[in-house]
Amino acid sequence: MEKTNRFFGLSLCVSALFGLLAGCTNTYDKSSSSSQTNEDGKTTLEEIMEKYDSLPYEYEGDACTITMCHWDGIGTTIERQVIQAMLQGFKLRYPKIDVELEILSDYESTYPSRLAAGNVHDVFLMPDGSFNAWAKTNTCLNLDQFIDASELIDMDEMYDTSLVRYRYDLKNAKPSSSGNQLALPKDIGPTVMYYNKAAFDQAGVNYPDPNTILSCDDATELWKSVTMKDKNGNVTRYGISGLSIEGLVWSAGGDFLNPERTAFPTDPSTIAGLKRGYQYIQDAYVTNFITPPVEFTAGSDGAMLFSQQRVACYIGLKANVTSFRELSFDWDICPVPAFEVNPGANAWSGSVGYSVYNKSKNIEAAWKLVEYIASREGQELLSATGFQIPCYPDLGYDERYLTREKENKPKNVEVFLSSAETQPAGLWCYRDTQTWKTQGYDATSELLMSSDPSKRIAVDEFLAEAKAKVNGSL
């Protein structure tokens, strides 16, 4: 119930932004979008597709039906609407190919059993966090030869960060940035800092510069300034939620594993960056009091605290935009603050892609769908829902896209585009499983932030324990 309530407004917003979402089959019902037209009387679908009419949308195979699987990420209704927006365009380009779309719950935990049993859809969602493990199952079609022959995809023009996370060296059976492309991205989800403009106005603080990555020291003072207390000195609004430990460590020059990702780091400068990141997190909780403790959050996540105006700023993904557009207060975005060593790695970016089942009976048709999703037309259709930015940077900087996004918020939409250029994939892409992280770092990190000094541990002690646990789990 909580999930449904939280994203009810989001569903309405997606539908309002893109008037071609009526119905759940991939057939184009022009009447369903007739009211959503531009000044020339064209629907969003028609306007976008007209740009690409000269491209060769060719399919020489027989008429067929292919199966497609997607997850319920932030809710079945919303996820289906976003995909159906793209599938309407696909059906117009490839009328001989029908697509049966299935939305599955608990996708990442249940789909591995399908991969093992060979019960796989022709086209299936590939979360970047599952890629390393699923690539080993020998179920993903190597897309290299199809990409080389494609006239719809220009990978040199896409965000490299959206591509490298789906490459795997099939010969040596390991992830590799120069390996085989086993999936193409549906999206790239950068992380930014959302801020409540009313909270800044109330505190008499200038809004952050959208073109500058704040240093961590400057950000600390900023977040202190917008923290609010009652007459008894109790904090009623904290400065920030959602601090990214990954971004703090990476931007300080640190990392969580060695370069081979086989053990705890040994390089002194890497360890120094790791320490600096965790020291900042600890200070944020117990010294600077800029981020809320568990006693304050009471189970609410950072996005909810921001929506309730209990934090002035929130570090989160692009996917929050559609629900935040329903908020009663004005807000905008800026880059995530970072240390000076590597400020571009100020947080992780998320992504999902699509793979083709290598034993599909309709490989050509399945490839056409994956190709279309990653094509410029497919990316424009998906981005028109407001749910994601295009995987092609130049499409994101297109005046029509920027105008549409700015009219609906945020005004500083370019921050998403610049952040996507430099933010790497998350720690889930380091290894097949997250055991090393959950046992090595997460299990003990709560003691760093404990409000009880008698239970709190120093960062040096924390890292010593993390080293033993990480190495013991690998």
Image (cartoon, grey):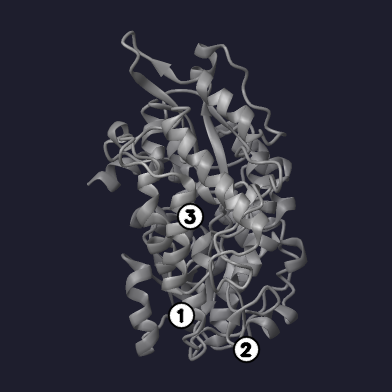
Which residue has dot 2 on it? Answer: 172
Q: Secondary structure at mark 3?
A: helix
> Would you place residue 137 above or below residue 368 in this image?
below
* Other residues around mark 3 within 10 Å, as few (<14) / some (14–19) / many (≥20): many
Which residue has dot 3 on it? Answer: 463
Q: Quadrant of residue 343?
A: top right
> Would you place residue 295 above or below residue 62 in this image?
above
Q: Position of residue 386 (x, y in %)?
A: 53, 45
- Decide which of tag 1 and tag 2 comes sooner along the chain: 1
Outermost residue, left side: 1
Q: Indicate which disc residue 450 carries.
A: none
> Would you place residue 427 above or below residue 94 in this image?
above
Return the residue nearer the eye: 216 or 197: 216
* Other residues around mark 2 within 10 Å, as few (<14) / some (14–19) / many (≥20): few
How far apart are labels 3 and 2 at the CA level? 33 Å
Which amino acid lies under the numbered mark 2 shown in the image of this protein?
Answer: Asn
Which amino acid lies under the numbered mark 3 shown in the image of this protein?
Answer: Leu
Q: Indicate which disc residue 66 carries.
A: 1
Q: Mark 3, mark 1: which one is toward the viewer?
A: 3
Q: Is residue 395 visible?
A: yes
Q: Mark 3, mark 2: which one is toward the viewer?
A: 3
